[in-house]
Amino acid sequence: MFTDDARLTPKQIQRIAKNRGGNGISTPVHHNGVWYVTRDIQLGKNIPGYAACKA
């Protein structure tokens, strides 16, 4: 999902963005003729019962 998607409704955003491992909605960036998306995923974030790994 992308933040600039005109078809993405506030209701869909609320349903999708549960902030588990990150919200799953990315913002595309156009640079030198190429579109880029960066997404940070935090394993186990807001997942009930997830045992955090201690490295």
Image (tube, helix red, strand yellow):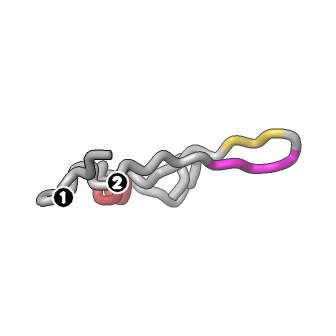
Q: Residue at x 53, y 48 (%)?
A: 39
Sequence-wise, which precedes: disc 1 or disc 2? 2
Asked whether residue 14 appears in the rendered view, the answer is no
Q: Nearer the viewer, residue 31 or 49?
A: 49
State whether the magenta stretch is mostly helix, strand or loop: strand
* Dot 1 and dot 2 residues touching (CB under 8 Å): yes
Residue 11, position in %: x, y? 32, 56
**Image mark for residue 43:** 2
Left or right for 38, reference 41: right
The reply, left or right, for residue 5 in relation to residue 13 is right
Magenta-drawn segment? 33-37
Disc number at residue 39? none
Question: Looking at the picture, which amino acid does disc 2 mark?
Answer: Leu
Badge 1 element: loop
54, 34: nearer the viewer: 54
Q: Please, what secondary structure does the residue beneath circle 2 have?
A: loop
Residue at 27 percent of width and 54 percent of height: 44
Identified by mark 1, the residue type is: Tyr
Q: Residue at x 29, y 59 (%)?
A: 15
**Front position in the image: 44 or 54:** 54
**Residue 7 point in image, percent of width and height:** 52, 60
Magenta segment: does it hold 34? yes
Distance, label 1 to label 2, CA atoms, is: 9 Å
Q: Is residue 1 visible?
A: yes
The residue under label 1 is: 50
Q: In the orientation shown, which residue stands out farthest toward the front?
A: 55
Give the tally of numbered discs. 2
